[in-house]
């Protein structure tokens, strides 16, 4: 409930600080006294966009602050979702600076207008002729039916599942799109992979292949050079080995003359051993050397394939080709696995749809059950409000399409007169009738759910007499469960209030100011008497006012 409102430097208000109680609060005042200014200021803390022209003194900032008691509203999760500090005494503050910029705070935390608007839906409902049009909107009509049907938790579950269903559908479409794109490349990727697999890259050593090719391609030269080497090493008397043997014999004769000669002799021995080993290696190479045109052709072909692959894939070594092959195989595997992924996703969607349909049908059945109850209650209240022939027909149809409100289409049909055909509410009801219908609906809703504080802005326009008395009684009944404000010109309604405020203007030398005054019992009698008979209060008007208050 709204516990206090502070307004400074707004429109015709210099400074205003007022506290409110629970129950039914009446606000009266002459036309033009500034009741709309009060509503305008309250609207700012509820998220309405600011306008520099609303500042009374453009050299100072405008401040509007409202305090709400939210202890019974179960709003902790909402505050958390908005990243706001929760307090049962929630303070909303709005400042409009002389520059035209505005700032908003919720419990001293800077807040956006979107956050204000979201939170305000749970705090106070300012009902005017504009809000009456909500009656003709599907979302509001569903809200009314679902309040009576106690559908809140089921609809929450349904909405979670619907969001999951939409996400799964989106994922399925992405998989199908990916499959379509990958199929275009599948055959080519398969060809490239086959080409890379045929050469058995994991067992290819490029250096060995190139060495093998050089050997096979130069057999005659290698054979000739090996033979020459062998001759140089082993020709009798002239070969290097024989010559070295002679040198070793000569040095052996002087090894006793010093360590240096002995060391030199040992080196000659070592060289001899190495030359013998070299000669053996040359013999082995010469023995294993043979021309093999077919092997040469095979090695050359393999090298040519590798070079072609290097060029095709713009790489320079086998390891890079192996990486490319692995990537291609992964793409092929992904393409081949998409069918399984798509089938799995379709199964998930099918399972979720069963739950969605179950929840949607439960929502539908509950709605169907309470529609006669709602119609009966509305028609009874409207009969008391001077519309004895008002009749409702609420059409509910279960559809195939999934929406945020389930799978139902809903239409409120109405007729105000006997013998008239039912038609859409917005076409069948006048503005005054819509106001009474809205009051009836709010009254019914108050029986089933915790409504926020509500402010009726001249909902009694166009009614008088006994009907206005009934309106006042309905608002009085509602105020037993919630905080109700009503701005009224009718004394019958004003007399029903627990608290009564009067909006009035005062004039100084060069300015007009709007004031708000809480009336005591004597003030209320005078105010209601003036509402009954004008400014010149008569004794009969005073007596009538006392009678209404009693």
Image (spheres, helix red, strand yellow):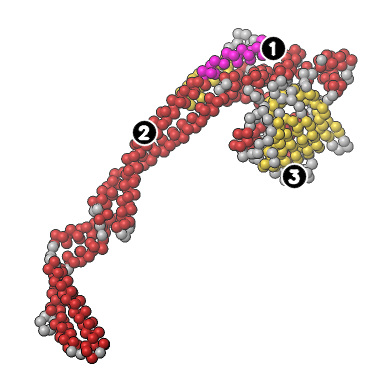
Mark 2, secondary structure of its residue: helix
Q: How far apart are marks 1 and 3 (CA)?
A: 50 Å
Instruction: Classify 66 as above or below 282.
Output: above
Q: Main secondary structure of the magenta part?
A: helix
Crowding at label 3, few (<14), some or many (≥20) Cα neighbours within 10 Å?
some
Mark 1, secondary structure of its residue: helix
Mark 3, secondary structure of its residue: loop
Q: Residue at x 18, y 89 (%)?
A: 253
The quarter of the displayed image where residue 173 is located: top left
Q: Point out residue 153 in the picture as x, y percentages from the top left corner.
A: 55, 25
Residue hosting label 2: 343
Q: Which residue is drawn at 28% across and 49% down?
A: 192
From the image, state whether disc 1 or disc 3 is nearer to you.
1
Residue hosting label 1: 384
The residue closer to the viewer here, 446 or 244, is 244
State left or right for residue 340 relative to residue 279.
Answer: right
Residue 262 visible in the picture: yes
Which residues, given as a range, are shown in magenta? 364-388
Q: How far apart are marks 1 and 2 (CA)?
A: 61 Å
Q: Point out residue 183 in the picture as x, y percentages from the top left corner.
A: 33, 41
Q: Is residue 518 magenta?
A: no
Q: Residue furthest front?
A: 256
Cβ atoms at labels 1 and 3 below 8 Å apart? no
Q: Residue at x 31, y 54 (%)?
A: 322
């Amino acid at each position: 409930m709204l516990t206090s409102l502070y307004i400074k430097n707004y429109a015709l208000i210099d400074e205003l600080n007022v506290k409110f109680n629970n129950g039914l609060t009446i606000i009266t005042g002459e036309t033009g006294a500034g009741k709309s200014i009060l509503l305008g200021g309250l609207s700012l803390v509820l998220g309405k966009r600011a306008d520099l022209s609303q500042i009374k003194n453009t050299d100072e900032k405008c401040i509007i602050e409202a305090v709400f008691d939210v202890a019974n509203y179960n709003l902790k999760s909402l505050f958390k979702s908005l990243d706001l500090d929760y307090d049962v005494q929630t303070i909303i503050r709005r400042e409009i600076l002389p520059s035209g910029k505005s700032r908003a705070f919720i419990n001293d935390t800077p807040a956006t207008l979107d956050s204000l608007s979201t939170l305000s839906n749970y705090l106070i409902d300012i009902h005017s002729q504009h809000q009456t049009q909500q009656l003709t909107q599907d979302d509001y009509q569903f809200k009314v039916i679902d309040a009576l049907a106690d559908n809140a938790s089921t609809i929450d579950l349904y909405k979670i599942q619907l969001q999951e269903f939409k996400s799964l559908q989106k994922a399925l479409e992405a998989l199908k799109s990916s499959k379509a794109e990958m199929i275009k490349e599948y055959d080519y990727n398969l060809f490239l992979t086959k080409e890379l697999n045929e050469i058995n890259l994991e067992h290819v050593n490029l250096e060995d292949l190139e060495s093998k090719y050089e050997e096979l391609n130069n057999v005659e030269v290698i054979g000739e050079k090996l033979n020459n080497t062998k001759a140089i090493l082993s020709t009798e008397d002239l070969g290097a080995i024989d010559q070295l043997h002679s040198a070793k014999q000569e040095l052996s004769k002087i090894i006793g003359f010093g360590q240096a000669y002995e060391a030199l002799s040992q080196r000659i021995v070592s060289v001899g051993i190495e030359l013998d080993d070299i000669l053996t290696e040359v013999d082995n190479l010469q023995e294993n050397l043979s021309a093999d045109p077919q092997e040469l052709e095979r090695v050359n072909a393999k090298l040519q394939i590798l070079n072609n692959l290097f060029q095709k894939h713009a790489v320079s070594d086998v390891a890079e080709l192996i990486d490319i092959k692995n990537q291609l195989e992964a793409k092929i595997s992904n393409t081949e696995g998409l069918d399984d992924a798509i089938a799995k996703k379709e199964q998930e969607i099918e399972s979720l749809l069963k739950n969605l349909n179950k929840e949607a049908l439960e929502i539908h059945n509950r709605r169907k059950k309470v529609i006669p109850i709602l119609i009966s209650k509305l028609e009874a209240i409207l009969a008391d409000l001077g519309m004895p022939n008002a009749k409702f027909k609420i059409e509910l149809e279960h559809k195939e399409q999934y929406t945020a409100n389930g799978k139902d289409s809903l239409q409120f049909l109405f007729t105000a007169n006997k013998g008239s055909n039912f038609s859409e509410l917005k076409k069948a009801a006048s503005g005054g009738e819509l106001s009474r219908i809205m009051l009836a609906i709010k009254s019914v809703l108050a029986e089933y759910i915790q409504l926020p504080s509500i402010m009726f802005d001249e909902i009694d326009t166009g009614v008088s007499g006994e009907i206005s008395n009934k309106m006042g009684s309905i608002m009085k009944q509602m105020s037993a469960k919630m905080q109700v404000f009503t701005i009224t010109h009718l004394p019958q309604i004003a007399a029903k209030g627990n608290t009564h405020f009067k909006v009035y203007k005062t004039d100084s030398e060069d300015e007009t100011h709007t004031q708000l005054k809480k009336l005591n019992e004597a003030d209320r009698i005078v105010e209601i008497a003036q509402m009954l008979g004008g400014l010149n209060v008569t004794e009969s008007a005073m007596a009538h006012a006392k009678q209404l208050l009693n």
